[in-house]
Image: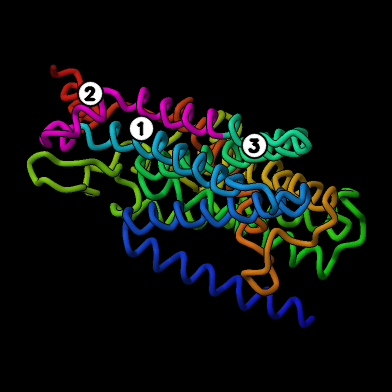
Amino acid sequence: WKNWVIRGIFTWLMIGCFGLIIYGGPLALMITVFLVQVKCFAEIINIGYAVYKMDNLPWFRSLSWYFLVASNYFFYGESLVEQFGVLINNVDFLPFLVRYHRLISFSMYIIGFVWFVLSLVKKYYLRQFSLFAWTHVALLCVVTQSYLIIQNMFQGLIWLIMPVMMVIINDIMAYVFGFFMGRTPLIKLSPKKTWEGFIGGGLATVVMSLGLAYFMCQVPYLICPIEYSAELERMTMSCEPSALFRPQEYGLPDTVTTWRRILGMKETVTFYPFFVHCFFMSLFASIIGPFGGFFASGFKRAFKIKDFGDLIPGHGGIMDRFDCQFLMATFVNVYIHSFINIPTPGKLLQQVFMLRP
């Protein structure tokens, strides 16, 4: 019970902090994503140093952080070019950086690559190459996913907030159902996980996510894409809600319509089209999302550690809280580009300005 109370208190504290960050706007969210990314990278890399005992090698810690900087330069640069093309073209020296952004990014990586080769020490070859691979896997898992989170955010804050809340809801409800009703073990990688928690948490996630989506669809601040306005010379989050966030009437099968008519009910149903997408995202968060946690559990067991860190009492490190979030962010980004992403006037204007010589 003591751990349950501590975990509960810090869960609500984190949710409260997340609410304040949302209130702070897109810039506050971007800074938060960057800080979380850096902390997650540090936790993963520190495990690598402890496993391979590389503290006595010169430059290797610096190399890992250099690759993090180079990766962020590439990914954040890609975001800035895509979202702020109009603004960038109005600043004298920035078009040069935009034009040669990928060349500069590649050059930065090559510098790190050559630096690594020159730092090789004969008796530590295997350990050095192992840690080099470890660093790149950490970059793939953390930096790439962070970039996708920011990409999702520019589609509208709802595409960042809803997936995050789905994972949080699933984690809390699976813990509650497992704590009070758990009897049947779910997976050996995580002995405390139970089928009761998995199923109960999944059903609760779907229902509660749809309820949360109902309120969020009515807030323009959350549903409007984040775009740069050349007229106002600032980022804007105001728009006419798209059809996705406006209530629509839908017909029902004849049998259902007949029964509704007999019962004196309306023959059609009205709901936000976003509910359909919310349903599928909540299914992913409930069924596939937990496997991000199972993967992290297997990783920690492989190296005989309890948590990635000890920053958050009752929860462990930052990576312990974001193992499922990164997987969810990737799915949402793929989902948006597959089923949602429709060019807006702002995005088309950005592309036109990027074509100017």
Identify the residue shown where x is 66% and y is 50%: 44
Q: Which of the two residues, 339 or 245, is positioned nearer the viewer here?
A: 339
The image quarter containing residue 244 is top left
Q: Say the numbered circle drawn on residue 351.
A: 2
Q: Which of the two residues, 339 or 107, is positioned nearer the viewer here?
A: 107
In the rendered view, does 281 fall on the left or right side of 192? left
Residue marked by disc 1: 78
Query: Mark 2 and mark 1: span between their CA atoms?
Result: 13 Å
Instruction: Give, as a single range, the part of the protein colored magenta.
Output: 86-115
Give above or below for 269 relative to 157.
above
Q: Give the label, 2 or 1, closer to the camera.
A: 1
Identify the residue shown where x is 62% and y is 42%: 138
- Mark 1 vs 3, N-terminal side: 1
Residue marked by disc 3: 137
Badge 2 amino acid: Gln
Q: Secondary structure at mark 1?
A: helix
Query: Mark 2 and mark 3: span between their CA atoms?
Result: 33 Å
User: How does the figure colour the protein chain or chains?
Assistant: rainbow
- Mark 2 vs 3, N-terminal side: 3
Q: Which of the two residues, 90 or 191, is positioned nearer the viewer here?
A: 90
Query: Mark 1 and mark 3: span between their CA atoms?
Result: 21 Å
Give above or below for 325 relative to 173.
above
Total residue callouts: 3
Q: Residues within 10 Å of mark 2 (few under 14, many from 20)?
A: some
